[in-house]
Structure formats: C-alpha cells, structure tokens
Image: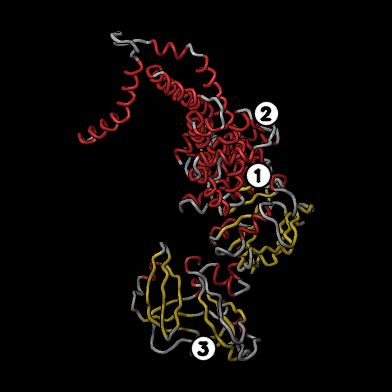
Amino acid sequence: MTFLQLENLHRAFGPVKALNGINIGLGEGEFLSLLGPSGCGKTTALRLVAGFDRPDQGRIVVDGKDITNVAPNKRDMGMVFQAYSLFPNMNARQNVEFGLRIRGKHKGEGRGRVDDLLELVGLSHAVDRYPHQLSGGMQQRVALARGLAIEPRVLLLDEPLSALDAKVRVQLREEIRRIQLELGITTLYVTHDQEEALAISDHVAVMYGGVIEQMGTPAEMYTAPATAFVAEFIGTMNRLDSTVVDGGTGEVEHSGLRLVVDAAKGRRNGERVLVLIRPESLELEAATNGAAPNSFNGEVLTQTFLGPVTRVKVTGSGTNLIADMSTARAAALPVGARVSAKIPSEGAKLISLPDDGPGLPVLDPDEQ
Amino acid sequence: MAPSAYVWLLLAAAYFLIPLYATLDFSLKENKAGAPCCTAHNYGWVIHNGDFWHTIKISFLLALETIVISLILFVPTIYWVHLKLPRLRPVIAFLALIPFIVPPIVMVVGLLRTFKGTPHWFYAEPWGFLAGAYVILAFPYMFFSLDAGFRSIDVHTLTEASQSLGAKWTTTLFRVILPNIRSAALAASFLTLAIVLGEFTIANLAAFHTFPIFLQYVNESQGFPAGALTLLSFVITWAAMLSLLLVGRKRGARSALITGAR
C-alpha cells in the first residue's frame, strides 16, 4: 500500500519549471532516492514534501491524508539538511531533544529515546558536546538522530553527505541505511551521487528537467535504463548512435562498424537507435590479423588505474569505447597497443532515437 | 612584539589617556587661590547634587526604553528580511543610513512638527517623544549590528530545521535564532546606550532635561565640578556597559563562544 504519494506535482519559479508533473508512490518503510544533476528539481520536490514550499499544482498524500497545505511544523517530517543545521547554542543532547521538548515529551520516556538515538548513531560519548566541537560526520549523525527523535512519518534527507569527505560519506551512508531498516521508517533521500543512490535505496527515481525519467530498483536502473538520459547518468556507458540495417538478424551500423545486437531484432530497417554497452561487458584482447565478428579494432588511448580494475579507452575509426578489465590483464595492453574489443550481442541495450534530432542530452561533465 | 610596536602602543595610549588625566587633574582642584593641590570637594558636590541623580536616572531609563523598543522592532524585522525578503536588505540598509545623513537639527524640527498634536503623555514626556526620536537615532547602530549577527548564522537552515521539528515561528525566534545572535544584540545595545547617554541636540531643542543637558549646564557655570562630573559620567557609562556585558555573557556565554568559533 502506498504510504507517501506525490501526485502530479508542478512548481515553477518564474519562467523556470522546477517540477513538471512528477508522480511518486512509496510504500511504508521503503527508501527512495531522488537522483539527478543540479537543477533537475529533486530538492524542490523534497521541500514540497517537507512543507517549506507549496506546489503550483498537484498534491502530497501521506498515509491517506492530503498534507499539501499543512504547515511544515505540523507535518511530522524529520529532516536532515545538506548544510550543517544543528542549533549552535545547544549541545548534542539538547539538539536531539528539541523536537520532543516542543511536544512536551522530553522527560521520562522521551529522555530515554534521546539516549537510545544517540547510541544508535554512535554518539553516546559526545552528548554534551556543542556543534563546533563535533566533526562534520558527527554533526550529521546528531542531525539524523534529531530528525528521528520526533518519530516522523517520513524521513527526508537533502544531500546529507555532500559536505563530508569520501570515506566518512561511505561509512555514514551505510549507517543511514542500517538505521532506516532497523526503524522501518519511510525515507526520501535526495542526492546527485548515483553510487550513493544505488548503494542504499530500495528504489531510485532519476530526475531531469523537472520530470522523473525513470523509477525502479537500483538493479533495474543500472541494467535496463529506459531513456538515453538514465543510461548516461547511471554508471558509465558506451553509446553508439546507430542505424538498424537488418531488423531480422539484429544488425546495426555505426560509423561503418557493423554489429549484431540481439535487442535490435524485430526493429524496423533504417530506424535510428542508441546501442548501449557497459564497459564491463566489453572484452579486450590484443588485435590479431583479420577482423573477428562483432569486434571493434582500435588503439589504446588511455589507461586509468582504479585499483583492482583498470579503465581502458580505445579509439579507432572515429569511435571511442571504454572497457573495464582486471588490472593484471590491462598491463598487457599498454597505451598505443592495437586491440580488438569484442562486443557481446546479448549484453548491449537499445534505445530508440528520433529519426532526426540529437541523440543524447548533453550533461555538464561535472555532473556526470 | 617589535620595539616600534611599543612606541605606537604608547602613542595611542597617550592620545586617549592624557585628556583623561588632564580632566582628573582639573577635577581635583579648587576654585580658591592658594588651595591645596588635591581635593575631593568637586566629587562631593556632584554626588550630593539632586539634579545629577535625577537627570542620570532619566537618561538611563531612556536608554533602556530605547534598547527594548529597538530590539522588539528590529530583531523580528531583520530576521524576516533575511528569511523572506532578502531583496529588501539593501533598501533597509540605505534607510538605516538616513539618521547619519540628516542633521539632528533638521530631524528634531521635523519630529516636533510631525508629533505636534499627539497626546500630551507622548509629546511632553521624555518617555514618549525622546524615546521615539532615539529609536530613530539608534536605527543604524541596531540595524548594522543585528544584520552582521544574522549574516553570521544560516538563518534559512536553522529556521527550517526548527520548523521541521514542530516549532512555531515564535519558538524558532526565541529558542533558536535569538540565542545565536545574542552577541550582535548586545553590541547593538551598547551602542544605543552610549548614544542615548550622550545625546544633546534633540533633548536640548525639545526642551527635555537629560543628563547631557545637565552636564552642559555645569560645564558652563562651574568649571572644576564639571571635570568631576565628566569623569563620573565616563565611569558610570563604562560600568553600565560592563554590567550589560556581564548580564549578556552569563546567559549567552556558550552561544557567543560558538558564534566566534564558526
């Protein structure tokens, strides 16, 4: 049963449409991440749910009750902000206690709950510390405990990890997920970090230009992107703007390169399609004389060491492909080596493109 | 510290301390030929003067009234401007400069004309007319101090965090925002206190008998006691500021410390 429902939400700021009719249904206890680049509308959506802003159109329903016009202080939403938001004049305990104090529940059971929550976030040793005496990660932990103290109906997190360093970010995101599962609290999480979203969510909604491009489980989003934008945004993807040559056999053509792709079978001849291949699906080996079927011959342009995996960029005939392979095997293919990249016919995905017009939305490189 | 720094420090100290010493020296003399070097007679005269206590009481109460009215008016206003109407900030900053630009004589004539016809309790009493004028006079000091305080905290996030936890506007203002701008409010209060205790033009032109008026009267009529009165007023003003600081510190030491650490 749907616990949190966003129905046809619209919000414009002057001529800019921040939200253009988004629909989301989230079951009780589920964790949904709103993922997208800056300006896609994800924070606007979260602020509408929190009550800090009102939609121009549409409604927000929690547990069957329309809360679209309810004041933020009456919504019972716990929120963790991107900026450090602890009250500087209160110590960790007083911060966590604040919401309970407002409700007159800070004594007795409430006090026990504050202690439990501070223990849950691993800060029972720092209850008397003031925000300026806590690290960024600790501050966000206290903020999380503070948001949970009021037993909110929905927990809202607005890029809570973006100000933290990489190691703390990974550690804290796992803690957030652990706590969310432990308490079974319905959670809406905003992030621009696709790795973060995929790692901790039950569902991910990718947003772009004020609309939801695709919503699904992390695995679905990664393996079956429904739109060119999702394919571009989630993970790294090789994209080949191609034309179907033979819909019967699934043959497509890209810049003179002919490939057989299972997903192209049954497509209309001459149809423009985008062939999507994950870097880990490509098999690289030293080039031999003669072209193997479904292969792309080229030269190693760069190698990027990523620990156990090395990312190899291959170029040839005006096409660039990226392949991920074990670092040990990549050592045998130095920069400048002639290589052959085998493209599996069953591993590639296909997205239809308009017969005329651009293939993919162009993302800001910083946001990819 | 380099030796040259001591020289500059001494020069600066001399600039402030020599006039004070000269006043002290003057205040210890007596208006008689051949009188002994030092006497506390002038101080005795001041302390036993009823007008001194009467006018200083008026000025202090006026200062307190001005501080209270100004804080009640300006804290919520500046908070709201920072939160909801940031575009109005430059406009208010410009308005706050007007009391600096308009000469006091022009202001007092304007105020006298504006308030003419208002009830007697307002127009003829320092607690009404003068307090009103002093709130205007204190506006720039209040605005720029409080504005700096609000800019040192993340007003939006703190407000939204407080609201999401169930707090009303008033709770947010008094429990979250005010404690974090306490040092700015204290600074604004100090400045207001100093201005009201020293303001002469408006009180004189509006014919109110405040402490600066008394000081000026003594200065014109009795030279040596004027020195004692000047020094005493100096000490009293500093004592008042110190007590305000101590009261503020006692209640907001932690928040001041935290604001400083940001």
Residue at image position (48%, 24%) is: B240
Task: Give the residue at mark 3.
Answer: A258
Q: Which circle, 2 or 1, is nearer the viewer?
A: 2
- Residue projecting furthest to the right: A64
Task: Give the residue at mark 2.
Answer: B121
Is the residue at mark 3 from the same chain as the one at mark 1?
no
Is the residue at mark 2 from the same chain as the one at mark 3?
no
Choose top left, top right, bottom left or bottom right for residue A92. top right
Horizontal arrangement in the rendering, residue A134 relative to residue B17 (left or right):
right
| Percent position of residue B104, x then y | 51, 39
Quarter holding the N terminus of chain B is top left
Residue contact between numbered discs 2 and 1, judged by CB atoms under 8 Å: no
| Disc 2 packing (10 Å; few <14; some 14–19; many ≥20) | few
| Percent position of residue B196, x then y | 51, 31
Task: Give the residue at mark 1.
Answer: B163
Which residue is nearer to you in this view: A247 or A134? A134
CA separation, marks 2 and 1? 42 Å
| Percent position of residue A298, x then y | 40, 82
Residue A116 appears in the rendering: no
Residue contact between numbered discs 2 and 3, judged by CB atoms under 8 Å: no
Residue contact between numbered discs 3 and 1, judged by CB atoms under 8 Å: no
Name the chain under label 1: B
Name the chain under label 3: A
Q: Is residue B106 above or below residue A13?
A: above
Q: Which amino acid, mark 1? A: Gln
